[in-house]
Image (cartoon, rainbow, N blue to C red):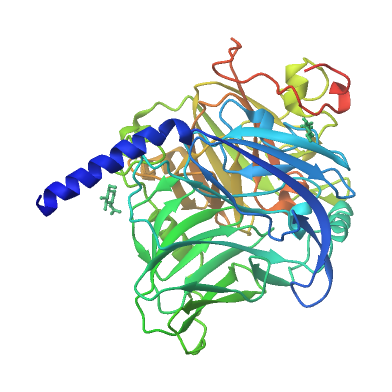
Amino acid sequence: MGNVALFHLICGIFIFWSVSLVKAEDTYKYFTWTATYGTLYPLGVPQQVILINGQFPGPRLDLVTNDNVILNLINKLDEPLLLTWNGIKQRKNSWQDGVLGTNCPIPINSNYTYKFQTKDQIGSYTYFPSTQLHRAVGGFGALNVYARSVIPVPYAKPAGDFSLLIGDWYKSSHKVLRQILDSGRSLPYPNDLLINGQKQSTFSGDQGKTYMFRISNVGLKNSINFRIQGHKMRVVEIEGSHVLQNFYDSLDVHVGQSMSVLVTLDQPPKDYYIVASTRFSRISFTATSVLHYTNSQTPVSGPVPPAPTGQMHWSMLQARTFRWNLTSNAARPNPQGSFHYGKITISRTFVMANSAPLINGKLRYAVNSVSYVNPDTPLKLADHFNIPGVFNLNSIQAYPSGGSPNLGTAVFPTSHHDFIEIVFQNDEATMQSWHLDGYDFWVVGFGSGKWTQASRNKYNLVDALTRHTTQVYPKSWTAILVSLDNQGMWNLRSAMWDRQYLGQQVYLRVYDPTPSLANEYDIPTNALLCGKAAGRHT
Ligand SMILES: *[C@@H]1O[C@H](CO)[C@@H](O)[C@H](O)[C@H]1NC(C)=O
Ligand SMILES: *[C@@H]1O[C@H](CO)[C@@H](O)[C@H](O)[C@H]1NC(C)=O
């Protein structure tokens, strides 16, 4: 038998074996997680952090596309807790989103079993606590969704796979940070920047091999720039999109964002710096780790590679290079380019302007003049049980109103199957990062100054990538398109947690007048009930 014939035979066996795994792969995975406090020394001084199963960062959640996750979370903190699954689309299932608009927080010494599916998703994601500023002190971790073996990814399988959770860090406890915000002041500068909760860590690999680095910004406020001394990074995936595989010396990753890069260890055997530093901030912090070649005898040396000198403009140009590979598939075998998003008529436009007003003498953050306050009853439960008085659908304008800033529970009414445009208008002089739950969206344009209808002429309507979190540059705008194909109550929020905490968030109620279990699952039988929903029956 010739080599080619042998190759085909092996491929045939492989395909047969893969197909026979399909059923086995749509599998259930069970987890029991316990959240506790612990004392750690990330900056050399003791501080209280949130551990999950004794770990900080929390356990890496490795899943496969279409896995069913049954995750029982036990709360052993002294405060109610919720985890959210950042970028997991929760199809038909906002019940499991883990934010206060959809879920009651898990009481102290109690538990809640999340049940969700990573339906048609692939990529690097994260999870983190969504309430009480818990995220400032841990409880976060990596959430990786791997492709099913029957769906090829557009790169060779790497020799290893590292998750790097990078974020600004405070020595103060979340309770102290909360007091600052509750008293109407802004957060101070952080104390440092950590990679996987540490000031020093090492990632080892063999010379000549290629490794995946999954980079996520889990910080509260600061954009970061990431780079590896002497090595180029090939970006392959951003929040579920397979992008054109360009090489980069350094990458900006904004708060709440994730991306996967491949790095080939093609340099002389020694150790190299892995560097992250904060960006666009007057006081800057740097974290370094080590890329260790297993055959290296030489410790890291030489100058730590510097951050790019280019600032906003540089970053915006880089962001425009992240584009869909139209011929590549994503979690499903059809090419990403087969969905012609640029040809769909926009049914509604929203312009969302962030601001930092004083309300009742205290600093708040707002969207179109409304600073969000959480009601005692999750919006989703109020909707389900028809409980009046929790929210109303006229509490916020779809455009900046110029009205005086006020507190409110802002919910945008939208219709299932609408195709909407959202313009994030940032008239402030600081960086913004916006996240939408339940969806990924096309990031079609960035521009400086005020968005106008003419800005649409510059949209990328061909190969914009989809993602769940987008940055908005100071005194600039970012435009996204969203296909509202996922019914439910979805949080649209600042990914910067002080801003989210003080009101820079809203909900999109994606509604269908004809209820159908084909479009949205029923309330889970174990749903926690609180506020005005307490005592109801699921
Ligand atoms: C709490 O955990 C138990 C199993 O230990 C489970 O049966 C129960 O459904 C969980 N509670 C909720 C609200 O999910
Ligand atoms: C796009 O994807 C195809 C199919 O997976 C792949 O062969 C090609 O190299 C990719 N192109 C770029 C520029 O990344």
- Expressed as whole percent of the image width and height from the top left, the position of residue 77 reads 86, 50
Residue at 53%, 48% in the rendered image: 477
What is the tally of numbered marks visible in this picture?
0
Q: In this rendering, is residue 340 above or below 147? A: above
- The part of the image, by quadrant, that contains residue 374 is top right
Residue drawn 58% across the image and 77% down it:
288
Q: From what the image shows, is residue 180 above or below residue 459?
A: below
> Residue 516, position in %: x, y?
58, 12
Q: Is residue 451 visible?
A: no
Image vertical order of residue 354 relative to residue 343, above or below: below
Task: Identify which residue is drawn at 23% across, 46% down.
Answer: 10
- Above or below residue 450? Residue 519 is above
Tell me residue 397's x, y (percent). 66, 30
Q: Does residue 437 appear in the picture of this structure?
A: yes
Which residue is the extreme one toward the left? 2
Outermost residue, front direction?
1
Residue 198 or 386: which is nearer the viewer? 198
Front residue of 181/530: it is 530
Q: Position of residue 229 (x, y in %)?
A: 45, 78
Residue 148 quadrant: top left
Picture quarter with the C terminus: top right
